[in-house]
Image (tube, helix red, strand yellow):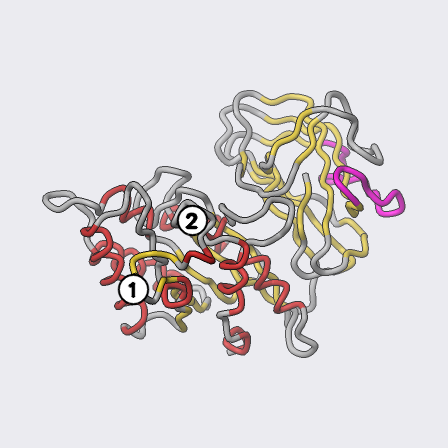
């Protein structure tokens, strides 16, 4: 599995997860290396991964396992290859299917191979939760909490064009100040209030924000799926703007309780999507007005103003639309990353 790094370092750990598994996952061997091209690695960088001194580990249902420290020089914004030999797995793996990087699957223990023998591919991450780097105390992380737009759906695969990755690249180019990592916690289809595509943002906040090391800031871009699935009608049980705002207030409160600041991102337009309609659009506009004007977020980034068509504000600009009318393309994601005032994160 190929992972594009944010900040670099010379000591790493990996985290493996069986968060939604129903049986034990047995990892018999694991390696990490610097990827050179496709499934090929730099032989000099190839490192064996151990877990509490052992070459393998069993992960029980719901469990997260952290590896031993790995001494390895890694540059910022580089590609690492993490290889797992799965000796036993019951049921569907814990996965993140919109990984946007090709992962390579082969039979047998090929973890130490210099390139993966021919086999299957996927674009998902299986059991791999994160790669953590040891960094100076002044370093910190930004969590981008969101749905498919944050996940990078609609961008070019194997090209690192999702806006959180492009934000990380901008931060990496800074010559002074703290080293800042950007963590993409986007889940396609995710909602703020209800479980569906993964548990809701409210339910996964502990795992995906508080459970990550060194977090000082959150960028929250989520809510359009709540509107599309529950707020395109009126009447009893229909979602209204006040419901989403209440959910945002909970996320703000929980961030502040833990000393974390949070940026609110306005919801981007979606006219042309089959789920969209005038009721949902009115809700989106009311939610965005609250994000901009309430003062409850520590800062605001106005993605809506950036990507909307000035002549049709309910619709995305044509040059930023990959054709599905909701997920910005590579150019749109670059514009979103460029919209941040980087000095905000040093407050």
Q: How would you rate the neighbour count of disc 2 (Cα within 10 Å): few for under 14, some for 14-19, many for 20 or more?
A: many
Q: Is the magenta region chiefly helix, strand or loop?
A: loop
Q: Position of residue 129 (x, y in %)?
A: 59, 43
Q: How would you rate the neighbour count of disc 1 (Cα within 10 Å): few for under 14, some for 14-19, many for 20 or more?
A: many
Q: Check whether the beta carbons of the residues at disc 1 and disc 2 lie within 8 A of each other.
A: no
Is 40 a magenta residue?
Answer: yes
| Residue to which mark 1 is pinned | 288
Q: Secondary structure at mark 1?
A: helix
**Residue at 63% across, 42% down:** 101
| Residue to which mark 2 is pinned | 147
**Residue at 79% across, 47% down:** 34
Specify which label sits upstream in the sequence, 1 or 2: 2
Q: Is residue 176 above or below residue 258?
A: below
Q: Position of residue 25 (x, y in %)?
A: 61, 27
Give the position of the N terminus as an image quadrant: top right
Identify which residue, 281 or 262, lies in the foreground: 281
Q: Is residue 2 above or below residue 210?
A: above
**Residue at 31% across, 75% down:** 295
Q: Is residue 114 left or right of 316 when viewed as pictured?
A: right
Q: Is residue 286 left or right of 71 when viewed as pictured?
A: left
Q: Position of residue 228 (x, y in %)?
A: 28, 45
Label total for image: 2
Q: Is residue 97 above or below residue 145?
A: above
Q: Is residue 257 left or right of 342 when viewed as pictured?
A: left
Is 310 a magenta residue?
Answer: no
Q: Residue furthest right?
A: 44
Query: Over which residues does the magenta segment extend?
Result: 37-56
Q: Position of residue 198 (x, y in %)?
A: 42, 39
Identify which residue, 316 or 150, lies in the foreground: 316
Q: Secondary structure at mark 2?
A: loop
Identify which residue, 279 or 65, lies in the foreground: 279
């Amino acid at each position: 599995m190929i992972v594009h790094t944010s900040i670099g370092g010379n000591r790493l750990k990996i985290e493996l997860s069986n968060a939604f598994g129903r049986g034990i996952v047995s990892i018999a061997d694991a390696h990490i290396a610097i990827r050179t091209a496709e499934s090929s690695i730099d032989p000099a960088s190839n490192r064996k991964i151990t877990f509490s001194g052992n070459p393998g580990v069993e992960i029980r249902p719901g469990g997260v396992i952290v590896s031993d420290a790995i001494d390895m020089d890694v540059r910022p914004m580089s590609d690492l290859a993490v290889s797992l030999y799965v000796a036993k797995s019951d049921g569907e793996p814990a996965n993140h299917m919109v990984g946007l990087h090709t992962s390579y699957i082969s039979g047998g223990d090929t973890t130490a191979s210099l390139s993966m023998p021919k086999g299957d591919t996927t674009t998902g991450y299986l059991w791999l939760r994160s790669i953590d780097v040891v960094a100076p105390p002044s370093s910190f992380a930004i969590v981008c909490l969101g749905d498919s737009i944050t996940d990078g759906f609609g961008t070019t695969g194997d090209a690192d064009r999702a806006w959180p990755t492009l934000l990380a690249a901008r931060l990496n180019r800074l010559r002074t100040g703290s080293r800042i990592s950007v963590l993409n916690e986007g889940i396609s289809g995710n909602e703020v209030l209800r479980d569906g595509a993964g548990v809701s943002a409210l339910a996964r906040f502990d795992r995906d924000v508080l459970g990550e090391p060194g977090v000082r800031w959150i960028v929250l871009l989520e809510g359009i799926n709540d509107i599309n699935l529950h707020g395109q009608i009126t009447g009893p049980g229909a979602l209204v703007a006040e419901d989403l705002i209440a959910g945002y207030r909970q996320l703000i409160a929980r961030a502040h309780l833990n000393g974390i600041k949070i940026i609110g991102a306005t919801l981007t337009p979606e006219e042309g999507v089959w789920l969209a309609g005038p009721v949902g659009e009115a809700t989106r506009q009311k939610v965005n007005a609250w994000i901009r004007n309430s003062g409850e977020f520590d800062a605001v980034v106005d993605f809506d103003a950036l990507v909307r068509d000035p002549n049709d504000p309910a619709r995305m600009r044509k040059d930023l639309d990959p054709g599905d009318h909701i997920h910005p393309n590579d150019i749109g994601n670059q514009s979103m990353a460029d919209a941040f005032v980087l000095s905000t994160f040093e407050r």
